[in-house]
Image: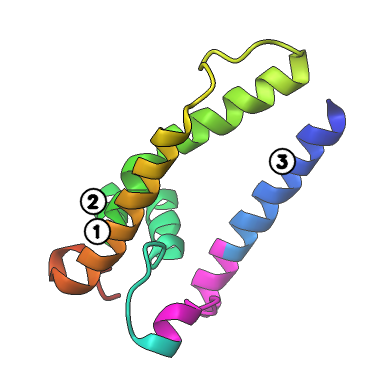
Amino acid sequence: MKKIVIKILIFLIILVLYLVLGSAFNIYIGCPIHDITGFHCPGCGLTRMLLSILKLDFYQAYRYNPLLFITLPFIIFLYFNNLYCKLYNKKSIIKKIPNWFWYIILFIVILYGIMRNIIPYFAPTDI
């Protein structure tokens, strides 16, 4: 259990350092899809969204990436539910998620990626 907690803490420290130092020196890893094609991928704006959440600016976080902003609490819940079940050898609160659910999620992500390049509202806002 200690190893998992240490790995999570190290990941969180690296993430916060990346976000804080990147903000201070304005150096971030850019999106290769956007750099090469000029199109916004479904993940574009993720770093700026996380920075806005750290600043408690939830409106701007939503504007950077609405899909990830809305789904972030569910992703965090699923991750920690899975971690809890592994650590304490318990059955999951959530029953096994069927495959058709993941196909719907994939469809939504692809549709969102198309829409954010057609409809300006879904594109990440400029800094």
* Residue 21, quarter of the rendered image: bottom right
**Can residue 92 be seen in this snapshot?**
yes
Q: Residue at x 50, y 28 (%)?
A: 77
The stretch in magenta equals 19-35
- For marks 2 and 3, give the CA distance: 27 Å
Position of residue 88 measured from the top left corner of the image (x, y, whole percent): 75, 14
Q: Which label number is shown at residue 63?
A: 1
Q: Residue at x 60, y 15 (%)?
A: 92
Provide the secondary structure element on which disc 1 rests.
helix
Check residue 33 for magenta coloring.
yes
The foreground one among 113 and 20 is: 113
Provide the secondary structure element on which disc 3 rests.
helix
Q: Which label number is shown at residue 80?
A: none
Left or right of 20 on screen, residue 126: left
Nearer mark to the viewer, of 2 and 3: 3
Q: Which residue is mark 3?
A: 8
Q: Which residue is mark 2?
A: 59
Position of residue 19 measured from the top left corner of the image (x, y, whole percent): 54, 62
Provide the secondary structure element on which disc 2 rests.
helix
| Residue 6 to residue 15: above or below | above
| Residue 3 to residue 97: above or below | below
Left or right of 105 on screen, residue 96: right
